[in-house]
Image (spheres, grey):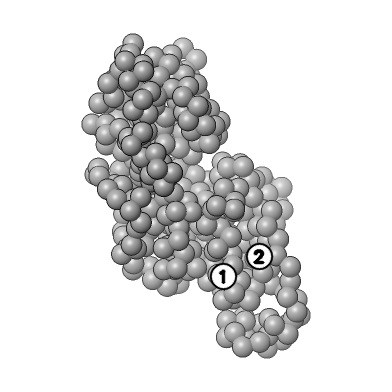
Amino acid sequence: MNTMNLKYFSRLLSSNPFNRRSFGGLLRYAVVLNIYSYSSFMSHDGIGNQVIEQFESTAKIKTKVTTFPDSFRMVNQVELDAQLKRPLPDLIIGFDQNTWPRVQPFADKWEKWTPKDWEKIPSFLKVDSGFLPFDYGELGFIASREGLKKAGIEEPLSLKDLLTDRFKKNFIIEDPRTSTPGLFFLTWSHEKSHPDTKSFWAKLSRQWLTLTPGWSEAYSLFLDKKAPLVWSYRTSLAYHRHENQGHLYKFIELKEGAPIQIEGAAITITSDQKQKLEAARLFLETLISEKIQEALPKRQWMMPVRQNIKLSKEFDGLSPKNEIISIRPTAAALQESLASWKQAIRQ
């Protein structure tokens, strides 16, 4: 949790025009934005603390951030809060297209409001009204060149290659029930293997080395050389280049292409106080501001959503190379896919 100390009331009423407009010149209590996010966003290396600092400096309004180990547990908490009729956070940061259908019922739809610089975000990243994208990444398999050589195998060319004997116990993926990258693998492979999806998943379950709860567990095993392939992001290569290890890894170009995960933030429908609503809107605008978007790639190791951001050399050649595959399933379709997947892997 990241809780900032409140400043004196006089500072809140000082020269900042945002606060004069919000409070109407009369301060009865300090406005605090309550935020849910995932832990790595607010970690020492994440972009979250810089966003908070820039927002608080501009708005002179404080934030209280509650973090969760991953975005799945964050969204679970939002649904539980609503079910138990507890106050929802004012902002939710870190869901994606797959978890958006679960967040959407609680999200402000913006109505006539449009975020500042919204036109600087490409249309393929604009998922829905109320969904503010702040970064994105292309998912696929990262390979260890040494690992492939040691295992005596060539890189896979398609999803079906993963079902062959040579890849048995040679790749790691994440559990779609607890991991957003894992859920993307499920929804994407469902689309690409249809109508033989259940058969594909049943066979695949006998092939993977392990199914991890989240991305960090999967990548840790990969770095420990437990398997030569792991489901991750193209931009993972940028991190390895930053560590002068880029030559050791590569992104596998499968013939099916690669899906794009878009991370987003939303204001909840409970943020109906004028002060909080204006503050929450300013926070969203801060996320896509030029300063934050310039800093984001080497903090999140993801791509910025704002156009014309100059990327460091670590990101050379890492922009999406495939036809944009932006998966946007409904909540019902997700439940159906998960149910089919669970049934298939038990076979």
Q: Which residue is mark 1?
A: 55
Three-letter amino acid code at the position of disc 1: Phe
Classed neighbour count for the residue bearing mark 2: other residues with Cα under 10 Å, few (<14), some (14–19), many (≥20): many
Q: Residue furthest front?
A: 244
Classed neighbour count for the residue bearing mark 1: other residues with Cα under 10 Å, few (<14), some (14–19), many (≥20): many
Q: Is residue 185 left or right of residue 7?
A: left
The secondary element bearing badge 1 is classed as helix
Point out residue 299 in the picture as x, y percentages from the top left corner.
Answer: 48, 54
Q: Which image quarter: residue 24? A: bottom right
Q: Does any portion of residue 79 appear in the rendered image?
A: no
Q: Which residue: 32% across, 20% down?
A: 149
The secondary element bearing badge 2 is classed as strand
Q: Is residue 61 above or below residue 70?
A: below
Three-letter amino acid code at the position of disc 2: Thr
The mark found on residue 68 in the picture is none
Q: Which residue: 27% across, 21% down?
A: 154
Q: Is residue 239 above or below residue 170?
A: below
Mark 1 and mark 2 residues within 8 Å of each other at the beta carbon: yes
Q: Is residue 152 above or below residue 305?
A: above
Q: Which image quarter: residue 228? A: top left
Q: Which residue: 66% across, 87% down?
A: 14
- Give whichever of discs 1 and 2 has the lower sequence position: 1
Point out residue 22 in the picture as x, y percentages from the top left corner.
Answer: 62, 80
Point out residue 239 in the picture as x, y percentages from the top left corner.
Answer: 42, 45
Q: Is residue 99 above or below residue 13?
A: above
Q: Does any portion of residue 80 appear in the rendered image?
A: yes
The mark found on residue 63 in the picture is 2
Disc 1 from disc 2: Cα separation: 9 Å
Q: Which residue: 25% across, 44% down?
A: 321
- Tell which of 198 and 301 is nearer to you: 301
Point out residue 333 in the picture as x, y percentages from the top left corner.
Answer: 43, 36
